[in-house]
Every structure is written in C-alpha cells, then in structure tokens.
Amino acid sequence: MQVFEIGVDDLSELTSFYDDTDGPSFDALSQLLQKPHTRAFRVSIHGNVVGVLWLLLSDDAVEIIDIRVAEAHRRQGIASLLLETMTHGLLTQDRTDIFLDVRENNGAAIALYERLGFSLESRRRGYYRGAQGREDALVMRKSLKPSAIDPS
Ligand SMILES: CC(C)(COP(=O)(O)OP(=O)(O)OC[C@H]1O[C@@H](n2cnc3c(N)ncnc32)[C@H](O)[C@@H]1OP(=O)(O)O)[C@@H](O)C(=O)NCCC(=O)NCCS
C-alpha cells in the first residue's frame, strides 16, 4: 500500500467514500483544500479509496482535521500508514507538534493515536453534539522534537 497526495482535481474520487460519515462534511473539507495550508492524502486499493487523512499546516505545527478508513478495511494498518508517512515526511520538517481533536467516546481513534505516541493535552468540555447529549473533545498532541538523550 502506498500513500498519495490528493489534489483539488482528484476530489471527485472521494465522494462515495464520504457518503454516510459523521465528522467534517466532504463539502467543508473540499473547500479547505482550496487553501494553501490544507493537504490531503489517500490510500487506495484496486483503484478505490480506502483511507484518507486531512491536515492543516501552520508555521510550527500540523493539525489533523480528519482521518478515516473504509469500514471493510479497518484494522489493517491503513490509518497508521497514513499518519506515520506524514510524521516521517517533509511536512513535519521545522514543525514541532501534531495536534488533533477526538471525541471522548471514540475508543478506536484514541487507541490508534495513543499507539502512535499521541497523549492527552487538554479537554474541550461539551464540544461535540452526540447521541447521548454533549461529548467532550480530547485535544491530543504528539511532539515531533527528538527526545532528549541522557548523556550519562
Ligand atoms: C480510527 C480509524 C481511523 C482507525 O483506522 P484503522 O486503519 O482501522 O487503524 P489501524 O489499523 O492503523 O490501527 C492501528 C492500531 O490502532 C488501534 N485501534 C484501531 N482501531 C481500533 C479499535 N476499533 N479498537 C481498539 N483499538 C483500535 C489498535 O492498537 C490498532 O492496532 P492492532 O490492529 O494491531 O491492534 C478507523 O476506525 C475509522 O475510520 N473510524 C471512523 C472515523 C474516525 O473516527 N476517525 C477519527 C476521527 S478523530
């Protein structure tokens, strides 16, 4: 599997992928991609998009706006591949942190992020609307700075 960047001309490939998802709408994401600080990446299998990652870049940080993998292709390492490719790529040069927001009840995503080295930074109380009322957003962060090595 390989990760490819999505350009504005490729957006039509993603419409069926975003058919019935929660999270940011495809329209909102597509509009963001018109702006220079937004980047999007995909993994495809047999010509079908099975995973996507959307990022917002600032001078010193990367923010994950959305990551999702088609249900039939989950637990095959696709989200990990997208995130690790991004983390080890040029996008993170000179940037110190990756941030993201995740619903407190999204156990799958939290397990993924923790496994990849993200940790809880803060909490936005009642940030999301959920089936059972308001849900908190967990703000998670991964440092891109090499960890200090103890010289002793
Ligand atoms: C969260 C999501 C992106 C994970 O994608 P994925 O391709 O299945 O993730 P990976 O296969 O790379 O998983 C890597 C590790 O994360 C953890 N993980 C992923 N899904 C998990 C789940 N459902 N339950 C528990 N742990 C999970 C596991 O440690 C997993 O490793 P393992 O399969 O060897 O145990 C996917 O479930 C998804 O698209 N969910 C809906 C959209 C969403 O919630 N996006 C996040 C928005 S913040």
Image (cartoon, rainbow, N blue to C red):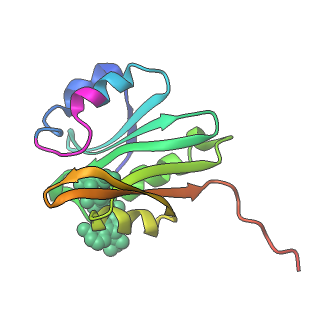
State the residue at coordinates (53%, 34%).
57
What is the quadrant of residue 47 in the picture?
top left
Q: Position of residue 28 (x, y in %)?
A: 28, 28
Q: Is residue 21 magenta?
A: yes
Residue 116 shows in the view: yes
Q: Which image quadrant: the C terminus?
A: bottom right
State the residue at coordinates (47%, 58%).
140
Magenta stretch, main secondary structure, is loop
Instruction: Give whichever of 149, 64 is nearer the camera.
Output: 64
Q: Position of residue 63 (x, y in %)?
A: 48, 43
Residue farthest toward the right in the current orientation of the protein:
152
> Would you place residue 41 above or below residue 75 in this image?
above
Quadrant of the picture in which ligand 1 is shown: bottom left
Q: Is residue 145 magenta?
A: no
| Left or right: 143, with 121 as reference point | right
Q: Position of residue 34 (x, y in %)?
A: 38, 19
State the residue at coordinates (23%, 60%).
74
Residue bounds of the magenta highlight: 20-28
> Would you place residue 148 above or below residue 66 in this image?
below
